[in-house]
Image (spheres, rainbow, N blue to C red):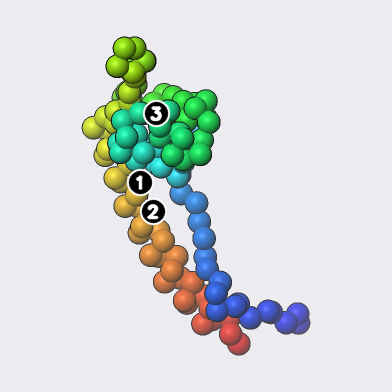
Amino acid sequence: MPRRKPVPADSRLRARLWIERAGAAAMTEAGADLLEQIEACGSLSEAARRLGFSYRRAWLLADGMNRRWPTPLLTTVTGGRRGGGAQITELGRHVLSAYRDLQLRLEHFLDRSTESFSRSTRA
C-alpha cells in the first residue's frame, strides 16, 4: 500500500466562488472587486486603474455582469464637460453584499475543514 505524505501544517483548502446565470459567470471575484471600487470612486476608469485592469477589461466585465442580471448592477455615464461616471445600482449593492457574505462563510467553512483534514491525515 502506498504511503501517504503528511499534510504540512501550513496547508489550506482553497476554493473560488462565482455565480452563474444561464450558464455564464454573472459575478466573480474580479466583478465584486470592480463593483467595490466603483462604489468607492464613482468611475469605471479609476476603478480599473486601482485594480490594475485595463479599461477594456473593466468595461467588458461590467457589461457582462449587466447583461446576465434582470436589471443592471451598475450604470455608466459617458464623459462630457464634467467627465463621465459609474454608479452601483440597488441590485448591484444587494448582489455584491450577498456575494461577499457567501465568500466569508465559505472561507470559514474551509478553515474549519482544513483543521479536520489535517488531523485525519496524520496517521
Question: Quarter holding the N terminus?
Answer: bottom right
Mark number for residue 91?
Answer: none
Is residue 31 shown to the viewer in this render? no
118 vs 89: above or below: below
Q: Residue at x 51, y 82 (%)?
A: 119
Mark number for residue 99?
Answer: 1
Could you say which is closer to the camera, residue 98 or residue 45? 45
Is residue 115 shown to the viewer in this render? yes
> Residue 53: image x %, image y %?
51, 35
> Residue 87: image x %, image y %?
29, 28
Viewer-nearest of discs 3 and 2: 3
The crowding category of the residue bearing disc 2, from other C-alpha atoms within 10 Å (few below 14, some 14 to 19, many at least 20), is: some
Left or right: where does residue 90 sit relative to residue 56?
A: left
Q: Are marks 1 and 2 in contact (CB under 8 Å)?
A: yes
Residue beneath disc 2 = 103
Which three-letter amino acid code belongs to the residue tagged 3? Answer: Leu
> Residue 24: image x %, image y %?
50, 33
Left or right: where does residue 36 sit relative to residue 56?
A: left
The Cα atoms of the two marked residues, 3 and 2, are separated by 24 Å
Residue beneath disc 3 = 44
Q: Residue at x 75, y 80 (%)?
A: 2
Q: Earlier in the sequence, mark 1 or mark 3?
A: 3
